Image: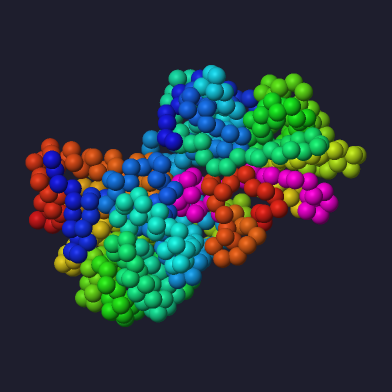
Amino acid sequence: MAELAVELGPLKLKTPVLAASGTFGFGEEYASLVDLQNLGAIMVKGLTLEPRAGNPPPRIMETPAGMLNAIGLQNPGLAGFLNKELPRLRYYGVTVIVNIAGDTEEEYVELAEELSKTEGVAAVELNVSCPNVHKGGILFGTSALLLENLVKKVRHSCRLPLIVKLSPNVTDIAEMAFVAEKHGADIISSINTLKGMYIDVARRAPYLGNITGGLSGPAIRPVALRMVFEIYKAVKVPVIGMGGIADVDDALQFFMAGAAAVAVGTANFVHPPTIPSIVSGLRSYMEAEGLTALEEIVGIAHR
Amino acid sequence: MLSVARVIEKEELAERCYYLLLLEPRLARQSMPGQFIHIRVGESYMPLLRRPFSVAGASPESGTVQVFFRVVGGGTRLLSALRRDDSIDCLGPLGNGFKSGRVTGPSVLVAGGIGVAPLLFLARCLVREQKKVILFYGAQSSGELLPVKRFLPSGVEINLAAEDGSTGYAGTVTAAFSEAVERGLRVGEMFACGPRPMLKEIVGLNRQKWSFPLQVSLEENMACGVGACRGCAVAVKGSGESAYQRVCREGPVFDAAEVVL
């Protein structure tokens, strides 16, 4: 049988299909709907040191083949996560990657430090790309200098595999990936949402409570794919590709562009068993093509 | 919780307001008044997201559930084109429904527009519990009012309101209900569903004047429908993370005393 387990540098995953941060909550929400054993990992909802209430509604709006969201990192904070969510995730037996965000370098460092001491966390994903908060977050992901300083500091205090999730809202994402790798990222994940907006014509005003939001879904897939393609050329560390993936064909495009694993986001909302169906689709594809490992096609579009 | 339902009946019962009868025995067995089903209206990416609809009735005996919807955009337009025997992808039943307590007075339901849907289901359950049920139901005009009598057991008192004065009380359903209270209507418990401005007014009046036990069923844009995305937030009294709750998960029915509309 085709081998679906992958090794992304120091991170071993049962399958190469992950649930993208913010789209799978803390696992519990989908536990009765999706066989979590198929998930390479759950990248949990962005976590901050203190609990956050999130942005005022409306927080989401559908757009052509996509959606805008401006949740604003609503989360229970580190203590809430450790006491309530993590034990439940461990009970499900699913690999847990914790997406962390902060207003300051110190907050990221403290989160990484605390999570490194915690059993049951497989990796930390540095969120430097959330477009929906007004401090920290995306600022770190849109300035090469700020990113360099942040990754350096977090790397120093983080004993877990370190993933840096990049923002597409930059001129040259490959440069950001290069900076992240140079200063200690073990893995790059890309992309986060594209900043966008919607205007309510009847009210003559922005629709979202936060004014702008992050665009996701199939609408962004060609952009995400191109960025993964460029990042693959710029770095040696593995890339987790994401952005509008909804079926096995989409996933294969990302592998061929250079992703060593993929994550599914918005499609989980539309069809909760998307990840298991992509996993089984990959298995069939590998068998049909005579592949023993997916590695054989990673980046093949560059050759 | 994912299942495929078959369309048994589809009918336009009022201006742009449709009735769907779906065959899906599990949904019919499990659905409670106030819960919703999250329907994927098509296979394409346009529209992309599912659409939430309150369950308007469920019959475990016949294995059917009822849904009402009003055509407001692309998703509901596609639904309105469904035909008998078509299949639709349903996720549900989801959310928390109405909780009816032991009360001394009648159960009063206040419905605005298509918001009547979950209250029809509730009314039938309350009647089964031998409760006295009074419905206030309003819309812009008589043409937009669903023929609710057809979906209610005898014994439910129905009070209609049309803002253009074309039938029943001439004015909003909130005004119709307020006047009835002023004239001495007894209210043991109260349930409301309708557009947000209407609910806001009722919740405000209840806080200032009546203090009836009141539950409201809320509507909000949803993505996942299961609580994962935190997209359908409603403000609640509290602090920190609990300043917002999820309409899909903690709701869609909330105690009016807890939400900030």
Q: How are the colours assigned in the image?
A: rainbow
User: Is A151 on the left-hand or right-hand side of B112?
Assistant: left
Up-down: is B165 above or below B9? Answer: below
**Residue A83: x percent and y percent?**
44, 62
Q: Nearer the viewer, residue A172 or A50?
A: A50
Q: Quadrant of the N terminus of chain A?
A: top left
User: Is A299 on the left-hand or right-hand side of A88?
Assistant: left
Query: Residue at left 78%, top 30%?
Result: B132
User: Is A301 on the left-hand or right-hand side of A157?
Assistant: left
**Residue A222: x percent and y percent?**
29, 53
Query: Residue at left 69%, top 38%?
Result: B100
Query: Residue at left 36%, top 42%?
Result: A34
Query: Residue at left 21%, top 76%?
Result: A182
Check residue A158 for magenta coloring: no
Q: Quadrant of the C terminus of chain A?
A: bottom left
**Residue A199: x percent and y percent?**
54, 56
Q: How many marks?
A: 0
Up-down: is B235 above or below B249? Answer: below
Q: Nearer the viewer, residue A58 or B141?
A: A58
The boundaries of the magenta stretch are: B205-233
Considering every residue shown, the one lying at the far right of the view is: B183
Residue A57 visible in this rendered orientation of the protein: yes
User: Quadrant of residue A22 in the image?
Assistant: bottom left
Check residue B209 for magenta coloring: yes
- Most common SS among magenta residues: loop
Residue A174 visible in this rendered orientation of the protein: no
Q: Nearer the viewer, residue A150 or A179?
A: A150
**Residue B66: x percent and y percent?**
57, 27
